[in-house]
Image: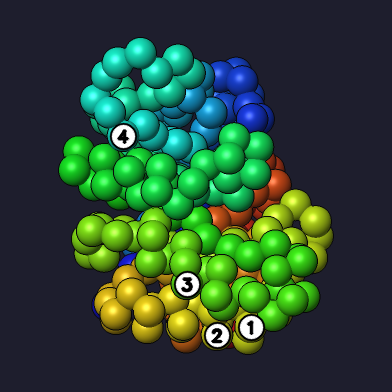
Amino acid sequence: MRRPVIAGNWKMHMTCAQAREFMAAFLPQLEQTPNDREIVLAPPFTAISTMAEQAKGSCVSLASQNVHWEPSGAFTAEISPAMLKEHGVAYTIVGHSEPRKYFSESDEQINLRARSAQDNGLIPIVCVGESDEQRERGEAERVIRRQIEQGLENLDPGSLVVAYEPIWAIGTGKTCASEEANRICGLIRSWVGAPDLVIQYGGSVKPGNIDELMGMSDIDGVLVGGASLDPDSFARIANYKSV
């Protein structure tokens, strides 16, 4: 039985003070949330400690927005699994399209990050997805399959989340049709060969489309960007009702 993971990626938003304000408004709205789903928030590194205090005793788990593959060393601006676990972090996002684009992260590096996460008791959320140009050229499936084959090499699917995030739908207001997102998620599951693999959809997820998305057979959660910055919006997403 696949347990849905509803995750919010705050990216480079939220000071510690803003994180406290968010949680004060957000947590009361989870009091009736069914326990058949996992609620995850990925704040910036500076707010992780604050968020750990705020989330204590709640149903909210924490994620980091990246992790390095070495336990320590001369890696300026990076963060190790042990540093994250010290603050109660349970998940880590790797391979998001923004680090891929802005910092030229390769599938090999993403795989190293994900393997390091698993080796140290963190659950990686590995992001995959095609650009608008790749989809227009009919290359979407080839691109995603390559990302899966290289990025998930030697990973345990039982301690893993894959997030299908079509790049053209991230922060653009465009949403991949639910049926198409479901089709791609089903393909990913078949390529990995793990029926119980949890696969999220990400890309302009909002309160208005969450119920439809979560009603799809192969979508096991969502990775939310902008809509996760508003406590009311993200609470509605966390409290989705499958149609």
Q: CA distance from mark 2 to mark 1?
A: 5 Å
Of the residues shown, which amino acid type is indicated by label 2?
A: Arg
Q: Which residue is mark 1?
A: 180
Q: Element under label 3?
A: helix
Q: Which residue is mark 2?
A: 183
**Three-letter residue code for mark 1:** Glu
Q: In the drawing, does residue 242 fall left or right of residue 124?
A: right
Query: Is 141 located above or below residue 114 in the figure?
Result: below
**Residue for badge 4:** 69
What is the quadrant of residue 161 in the picture? Answer: bottom left
Q: Earlier in the sequence, mark 4 or mark 3?
A: 4
Label 1 Cα crowd, 10 Å radius (few <14 / some 14-19 / many 20+): few
Residue drawn at (41%, 43%), measured in percent from left and top? 109
The crowding category of the residue bearing disc 2, from other C-alpha atoms within 10 Å (few below 14, some 14 to 19, many at least 20), is some
State if disc 4 and disc 1 touch (CB < 8 Å).
no
The residue under the point 44% across, 76% down is: 188
Instruction: Please state which of the two labelled residues, at mark 1 or mark 3, is closer to the viewer.
Output: 3
